Image: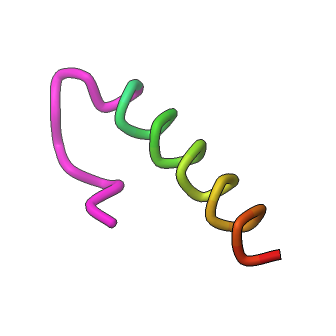
Amino acid sequence: ENCKLKSANWKVRIGKCKLKSANWKLESG
C-alpha cells in the first residue's frame, strides 16, 4: 500500500489507508 504518499490530500489518503487496513483485517478474519 502506498499509504504514505506525499500529497496535498495526505489527510484523505491516510483516512482511506486506515479504512483499507480495517477492511483487510475484517476480510482476513
Picture coordinates of residue 15, whole percent (x, y): 51, 33
Q: Is 16 colored magenta in this rendering?
A: no
| 29 to 16, vertically: above or below | below
On the rendered image, what quadrant is the C terminus found in?
Answer: bottom right
Picture coordinates of residue 10, whole percent (x, y): 30, 31
Picture coordinates of residue 12, whole percent (x, y): 39, 25
Please identify the residue farthest to the left as the structure is shown. Answer: 7
User: Which residue: 35% across, 36% down?
Assistant: 13
Return the residue nearer the eye: 8 or 17: 17
Please identify the residue farthest to the bottom as the structure is shown. Answer: 28
Q: In screen coordinates, is 2 left or right of 7?
A: right
Q: In screen coordinates, is 13 left or right of 16?
A: left
The magenta segment: 1-11
User: Which residue: 47% across, 48% down?
Assistant: 17
- Most frequent secondary structure within the magenta stretch: loop
| 6 to 21, vertically: above or below | above
Picture coordinates of residue 21, whole percent (x, y): 60, 58
| 15 to 8, vertically: above or below | below
User: Which residue: 40% across, 27% down?
Assistant: 11
Q: In screen coordinates, is 18 left or right of 1?
A: right
Please identify the residue farthest to the right as the structure is shown. Answer: 29
Return the residue nearer the eye: 14 or 20: 20
